[in-house]
Image (cartoon, rainbow, N blue to C red):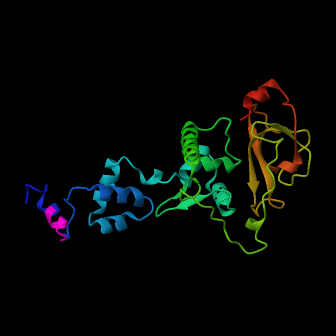
């Protein structure tokens, strides 16, 4: 038998006899294909049970195939949050509104890096290097499929998953267009009513972040807000700052007060 088969196990399986313990059996191309397709989709215990192997053997084979569960179908939203420094609940807001397609696996919720172009909070003029590279790779793959005459949207598992909410809930309110005149790095002057900042006279600050807010703890309805850094007006120590989250509608662009202030802008 060993003249025709590499091992007795392979000979028995060729004859149709399935052995119970496959932990020491060599890996076949069919098993490698199954691991590559099931990684991130099924739990590791399920993959191990289907192949008759241990979970540690599955983890070892994944490493040998140079694959990672957290990179199997894109980027998990936790990695997107760490890389872009955008709060995870902000990314989930895009997902719940159906603006950001995702793929919900057994362990992670995967996002296609190229789909992050829909996230207004990402600064694509100076994106993180790894995010830029991942987005370019995804866009190149889409272009290749388009040139081949295939629909890249149907060939990937990412789908919009809007949250079905009851009428009247704050999450069901459509989001207004992002303001064009107020962006991170813009110097602004407070001109409108701001209950969160009663001492607003003649104060100029620098915008650190612009975000869509639906929090009921903040004053006003859901709207665009800006995180603005001001120089402290009632502190003797020079160079200290204070941050307020203000409605964008209460701000207007302004010139920086001094050259020193330009250096302190985030």
Give the camera-side residue of 107 and 214.
107
Can you see residue 232? Answer: no
- Expressed as whole percent of the image width and height from the top left, the position of residue 113 reads 58, 47
Can you see residue 187? Answer: yes
Quarter of the rendering containing residue 203: top right
- In this view, 124 is above or below 216: above
Report the side of 201 relative to 160 (left or right).
right
Q: Quadrant of the C terminus?
A: top right
Question: Which residue appears at 86% of the width and 31% of the height?
Answer: 255
- In this view, 93 is above or below 46: above
Give the magenta part as a residue range.
11-17
- Expressed as whole percent of the image width and height from the top left, the position of residue 59 reads 33, 55
Q: Quadrant of the N terminus?
A: bottom left
Question: Which residue appears at 82% of the width and 59% of the height?
Answer: 219
Question: Which residue appears at 14% of the width and 63% of the height?
Answer: 11
Quarter of the rendering containing residue 138: top right
Quarter of the rendering containing residue 181: top right
- In this view, 25 is above or below 133: below
Question: Which residue appears at 82% of the width and 43% of the height?
Answer: 180
């Amino acid at each position: 038998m060993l003249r025709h088969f590499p091992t007795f196990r392979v000979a028995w399986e060729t004859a149709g006899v399935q052995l119970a313990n496959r932990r020491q059996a060599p890996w076949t191309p069919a098993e490698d294909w199954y691991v590559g397709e099931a990684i991130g989709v099924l739990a590791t215990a399920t993959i191990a049970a289907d192949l008759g192997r241990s979970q540690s053997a599955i983890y070892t084979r994944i490493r040998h195939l140079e694959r990672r569960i957290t990179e199997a179908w894109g980027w998990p939203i936790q990695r997107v949050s760490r890389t872009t420094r955008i709060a995870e609940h902000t990314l989930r807001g895009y997902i719940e509104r159906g603006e950001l397609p995702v793929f919900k696996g057994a362990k992670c919720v995967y996002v296609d890096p190229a789909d992050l172009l829909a996230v207004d909070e990402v600064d694509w003029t100076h994106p993180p290097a790894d995010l830029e590279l991942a987005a370019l790779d995804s866009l190149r793959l889409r272009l290749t499929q388009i040139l081949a005459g295939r629909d890249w949207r149907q060939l990937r598992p990412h789908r919009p998953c809007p949250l079905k909410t009851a009428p009247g809930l704050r999450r069901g309110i459509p989001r207004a267009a992002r303001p064009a005149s107020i962006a991170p790095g813009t110097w602004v002057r407070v001109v409108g009513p701001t209950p969160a900042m009663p001492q607003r006279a003649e104060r100029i600050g620098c915008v650190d972040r612009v975000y869509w807010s639906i929090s009921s703890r903040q004053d006003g309805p859901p709207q665009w807000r800006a995180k603005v850094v001001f120089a402290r007006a009632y502190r003797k120590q020079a160079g200290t700052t204070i941050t307020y989250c203000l409605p964008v509608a209460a701000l207007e662009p302004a010139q920086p007060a001094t050259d020193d202030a330009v250096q302190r802008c985030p």
